[in-house]
Image (spheres, helix red, strand yellow):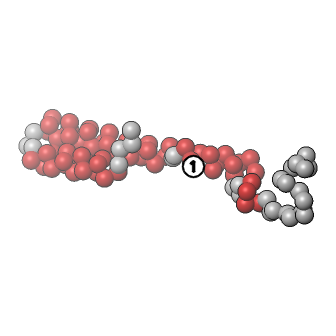
Amino acid sequence: MTISNNTVLQKMMKELQEAQIQQQHNQDITIHISKIYMLCELLLDKQESGSPLDATQQEQIAMFGEIRASKEDKHEKIDHEDANGDSIFDF
């Protein structure tokens, strides 16, 4: 389950508002700040980890030096009069 950045930011704002209300109670402020800190870490970890698609692209770049086009994009159709397919074994 993916949590949107907006949801995390909303929770952070709620904790900040509660901390402002309880300014005179240091222990309560510390609890709210700790929650905000954890929410910040959640956002930072989410950005650093990347998505599975990003990891695949990075792996392709590491292996090939660039992201290669799919086989269909690189393969041009050649019209051979009576040939049926792309393989030399298609008659």
Number of numbered markers: 1
Q: Say whether residue 71 is visible.
A: yes
Q: Tell me: residue 61, above or below residue 80.
A: above
Quadrant housing residue 37: top left
Give the left or right position of residue 13, taking residue 45 as reference: left
Residue found at the far front of this picture: 82
* Secondary structure state at the residue bearing disc 1: helix
Q: Amino acid at mark 1?
A: Asp
**Pointer 1 local density, CA inside 10 Å: few below 14, some 14–19, many at least 20:** few
Q: In the image, residue 90 lies at what x, y percent?
A: 88, 48
Residue 8 in the image, given as x and y percentages of width and height: 30, 47
Foreground residue, 37 or 26?
A: 37
For the N terminus, the image quarter is: top left
Q: Residue at x 64, y 49 (%)?
A: 58
Q: Is residue 22 left or right of residue 5?
A: left
Is residue 41 at least partly visible in the picture? Answer: no
The one nearer the camera, 21 or 25, is 21
Question: Seen in the image, is 45 located left or right of residue 32?
Answer: right
Nearest the camera: 89 or 74?
A: 89
Residue at left 35%, top 51%?
5
Work out whether residue 61 or residue 22 is closer to the camera in this orientation and state it: 61
Q: Which corner quadrant of the image does residue 3 belong to? A: top left
How far across and down, in percent of the image, does residue 59 sit? Answer: 67, 45
**Residue 71, how many percent across, how many down?**
74, 54
Location of mark 1 (residue): 54
**Residue at (9, 43) in percent of width and height:** 22
Vertical placement of residue 45 versus 77, above or below = above
Q: Residue at x 56, y 47 (%)?
A: 53
